[in-house]
Every structure is written in structure tokens, then in C-alpha cells.
Image (cartoon, helix red, strand yellow):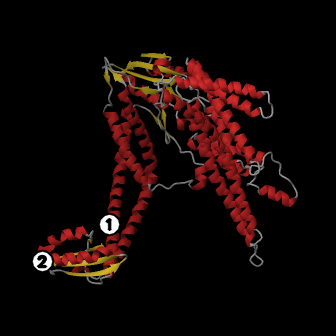
Amino acid sequence: MFRPNEMLKLEVITLNRYKDSLLTYLHETGVVELREVSVEVAQKDTPNEFYRKAASYSIGLSRLVEFLGSFKEESGGGIKGFIFPEEPRKENYRYRGIEAIIKDVEAFLEEAEPEIKSLEGRINAVSTEIDRIKTEINILELLAELNIDVSYLRGTDFLEIVAGTVEKDKYGPMIDEITRALEGKVAYVSRETKGAYLVVIATLRRDFDRINPILAKYSFSRLEVPEGKGTPRELIRELEGRLGEKERELDELRKEGKELARKYYDRLAFYQEITENEREKANALGMLARTNMTFALRGWAPKEEVSAIVEGIKKLTDGKAYIKTSEPDVEKELDEIPIKLKNPGWARPFEMLTEMFGVPKYNEFDPTPILAFTYSFFFGFMLTDFMYGLLMGIVAFLLVKGHSRFNDGTYKFARVMLWSAVFTMLMGIVFGSYFGDALIKVGNALGFSVPYAIDAMRGALTVLIMALAIGLAHLFVGYTMGFINRLKNGDTMGALTEQLSWMLIILGVTLLALSTVNAPLKSAGMGLFAIGFLLFVVAELRSDLPVLMKLLMTISDFFGFVGNWLSYARLMALALATSGIAMVINILVGMIWGVKLGPVPLGILIGLVLFVGGHIFSTAINALGAFVHALRLHYVEFFSTFYSGEGRRFEPFRAKRKVSKLELEV
């Protein structure tokens, strides 16, 4: 806790014949991050023909999966499916090498691919025909304004006839210019339709090249007149009949698609996942080095996993492997060491919030344990309503239960929201907020009182003082962590001038504030503040900037700290916003509650809808605000006191298994 997982370097050299099984073992174990081997006396490894085939089949299978996926009958959808998703069934596959995988995939595709591609071709052909018919119907609906045989709208050996549309304001100038260009040797007919003009122009074929640029100049949109004889309405009826036939044909083909999906989809997805993982292994080969007989790999692994990995490698290679593990040289390899966060179970879901900003360097503190508490507390302080917290907690609890088997992003986020909901309910009790002042109003009407420590609306100044005090404490913790971290890493001067200085300033401000009730604390507060400010000035003077810039930066940095501190006033602002919105909803409900329409208590019905809908909306919008601003207070104000977040995230060489499970003998 507070430090990333200890990492070890791993280097392996063994015989080429173990390469496939060793890579598969590391891929399935998923605890080693591979790194490129520097090549001096060897050469880069490359995929063989079987790996290249696996990559090709992976792409082809993905396309087939996508096609049949549109016909697959899904189960467990909707809200219930989101909260309690079904765990996909994993099919075992006994690993016998990349060659055996390719043979199995080819045998399956030989049976399934012709049927699927045949259906795909027929569906595409019918869909294209349907689109063509619909396009022709749309054109004929425009031409229906003319009510003439469409065969008259097609050119002859001597005449060029074009039909199309042009914008209203361009119609007149276009016709005038065409008439002048052809000296009146043109015939046209037009109808106004839907903000434009439908125009049919007839001219001698030899003269058409003279008006073509004019049509383009006025953005004349030409219509391709459909084949056939008869009026547009007659052809539309004929085309609608053909459209119905094609749509019925498409429905039959879709039924075939559902049958094929039931027959092949699961196997397609299975083999697609198998080949996709083989493709990832093929991509990893470029990081290996090889000779005619051997190959070498290197990587990083968490310290607690290394002994098991080494034992597995020895078993796979029958002991014919050179394996070296070593501690990292932190000074030389600081930027190369991958970071895997290590926290107790209660704090682990909050790692996602830390990682959104960036992981720590190997010699930095991991802020996740502190963030887990302060983020939840800030969220609760800003949402500050017991019932809002209860509603959010119920949803979060259901998501935690439904996604616990997957340990996915939804599960982690729900865990974060569950802790935040607990703090929201606690702060709701402190502020006496239950759907705003709804419970207080009910209590006044029924003769009981609701206990609370602070009235957020009437005691806004008290809430502001609390927010600023919390802000000082939060910043002090950050500077303290930075102070310890700098000392640990040998930067004593930086610890004294850039961290201890602000710690003393914060302590000084705190004692000066307390001196209003305890006068003797004033001198101690002024002393600590003066020492801290002096150290702060020393830090500014250590920079290489010109004297004037040093002075300006001293002023800027000091007031930057003040700005960061005052930023915690948003705790008060959002707490008041939550109370204010809830109060407005309750006032509106109270205004219409007694309204009746004859004997019908219309006000009660509308009031209940407004109360429920309004407070659900208030919960959602204020929870969103609390989520964003609680993050901001950490990312901008808190992390800037000690945390860089510039570490390199641990990205293990890991197989992705949703529908398959590899049986690998070690």
C-alpha cells in the first residue's frame, strides 16, 4: 500500500523448439510484460507461415462473426441484462501447437464458410435491389408532378432530355442563361415542389455540351429517369409490388441467417478468439531475438509472480533454459520500470481513478488509499442528501452483485459509487437532508422533528469554513507525502523548500485561524508562517530565471496556492446547489398539492410525479457534478502537491478469453 508493486526483470534463453509453448504459457498466465531484446549477435524473430495464417484467419473470422452476429438472437438484454449480465460459456480447447490450431480452423471454415458467404452474397444482392427500387420510387414521386409518360423523359438519337431539380432562386437565372446560350433552341417544363423547381429540359443533342456547364453552375441536380413506360404513378405501383416481393425474399434470407447463426456463430466466435490470440503472439515475436538454435526474451513481472513463472518455464523447457531475474536499477531504469498498483481490496476499485490521471513512477507514492477515502468523502459532502445516497447506493449495490463475477470496469465503478453513496448518506444525516427539506416539512406537519447538525442553507458560512478547513487538511496531506517522498529519494533541499515550506504555511494559517478562540496560538502561527514563507522564497530564488521573473513567479506561485485552497469552496457550493434544487422541487410540489379538478385530487397525482421525477433528476445531475468536481479537487489541487503520474503502466502479455479456455500442460 502507498507503493507500486515490486517488479523484477526477467531474461530467458532457450531452444527454438520450445518457443511456441513458452509464448503460449506466458500469454495465458498474463503476468509478464515483454520488452524488445536488443539485437547484437542475433537477429529479430519473425512469424512463420502458421502464425501468418492465424493472423489472416483472425481477420476473416471477424468478418464472418460480424455478419452472423446481426442474426444472432440475444438473450438477457435490457436493464436486467445490464445489471445482471449472463456469464458467457467458455469452451475448452486442448492446445497442441499452432499447426494444430490452423488445421482445426481450416477444417471448420471448409464446412461453414461456403454456406455463410453464399447467404451473404444473396442478402447483399437483394438489399442492393431493394435500395435501387426505393431510389427509383423516390425519383418517380418527384416526376409525378408532371404526370407524363416517363418514356418521354429519356433522350433520342437527336434530342438530349434531362430532368432534375434546382433551387428556387436559381431557377429563373438558369433558364435565362440557357435560352440565351442556345438562342431559344430549347424546350422546358417545370413545376414548383418542396422549396425547389422540378425542371425537364429538351435540346438538340449536338447543343447539349453548351448548356452542361450552365447546369453545373446553378447546381442542377440531375435525376436518373427509371426504365419503363407509363406515368410515374403507374410505375410507382409496379415498383411497389416488386419492392414487396424483394422484402419478402429478404425476410426469408434473414430466417436462413438466424438458422446459420444458431448453427455456426458460437464456433465462429470461438475460433476467432483462438486465432486472435495467436495473432497477438505473432506480433510479440518481433520483440524476441533468435539464432539458428535458440531464442531470447526479456520482460518485467511482479516480484510475487516470478518464482511461479520461473518454475513453469523450467517445466516447459525440461530445464533446458537460461533464466535470469534481477532487481531494477531505479536510478538508471526509472522510466523503464512498469507500474502495477498494489492496494488492499477496499481501495482497489479506486485504482481506476488514479490510472485515469496516470500511474506513479516506481519511486513515487501511490495516492490510491488516500484518494479512496477523500474522494468518497468529497462526493458525499457535495451530494449531501441521505435519500439521494440511498438511491445511488441501491443501484451501485445491484451492479456490484451483478458484475462481481467479471471484475470489469462496471464492477469497479459501482464499488466506487457504493462507497460514495455511504458517505453521501452520512453527510445527509449531518445536514438533515432527506430529499432536501421534504422530511423536515413532513415532520412539522406531523409533529416530529428531524435531528441535524448543520442547516446547509441557513449556515452557508459555517459550511464554507468547513470546506476551507478540509481543503487545508487535504493539501497538507499532499505536501507531507511529497516531503517524505523527496527525502526518501535523496532530494533534501527540494523537500525543505518545496514541500516543508507549504506544510509550515498551512500550519501557520491553521494556528492563526484558531487564535481567534485561543490568543496564545497567534504568535506560534505567525512564526510557522514566516519560516514557511522564507523557505518558499528560497525555493523561488533557486531557479535560473532573471531577478524580475523570480519576483513575479514568487507572487504568482503564492497566490496560485491560495487559489488552490479557495477551490475547495466548491464543496460548499455543490452542497448548497443540491439542497437548493431539492428545495425548489419540494416548493413546486407544495404549490400544486392541493389542486383539485372537481372530486379528482389532480394536485396530488401531478405532485407525486413531479416529486419522484424531480428528485431522480436532481440525484442524477448533482451526482454527476459531485463526480466531476471530486475528481478535479484531486487531479488539479491535491496531485499537484506531490504527484507526477508519469509512470509507465504495466501492460502484461495476456490472452483475452471470453468464450474459450486453453488447456495447456505445464
Secondary structure under the numbered disc 1 in the rendered image: helix
Report how far apart the C-alphas of labels 2 and 1 lie in the structure.
32 Å
**Seen in the image, is 265 located left or right of residue 645?**
left
Q: Position of residue 542 (x, y in %)?
A: 52, 22
- Which quadrant of the structure image shows residue 39? top left
Task: Answer yes or no: is residue 167 visible.
Answer: no
Please determine whether, in this image, residue 417 is positioned above or below residue 190: above
Please determine whether, in this image, residue 520 is positioned above or below residue 93: above
Q: Which mark is residue 158?
A: 2
First in sequence: mark 2 or mark 1?
1
**Seen in the image, is 5 located left or right of residue 417?**
left
The quadrant of the picture occupied by the N terminus is: top right
- Which quadrant of the structure image shows residue 252? bottom left
**Crowdedness of circle 1 by 10 Å Cα count: few (<14), some, many (20+)?**
some
Q: Amino acid at mark 2?
A: Phe
Please determine whether, in this image, residue 268 is positioned above or below residue 293: below
- Which quadrant of the structure image shows residue 245? bottom left
Q: Amino acid at mark 1?
A: Glu
Q: Position of residue 436 (x, y in %)?
A: 74, 54
**Seen in the image, is 422 located left or right of residue 225?**
right
Q: Residue pushed farthest front?
A: 548
Residue at position x 42%, y 65% in the image: 251
Is 291 or 639 nearer to us in this picture? 639
Q: Do residues under tags 2 and 1 come within 8 Å of each other at their CB atoms?
A: no
Q: Position of residue 329 (x, y in %)?
A: 48, 17
Secondary structure under the numbered disc 2 in the rendered image: loop
Q: Which residue is mark 1?
A: 129
Q: Which mark is residue 159?
A: none
Residue at position x 34%, y 74% in the image: 137
Task: Answer yes or no: is residue 12 visible.
Answer: yes
Residue at position x 77%, y 70% in the image: 594
Mark 2 or mark 1, whichever is nearer to me: 2
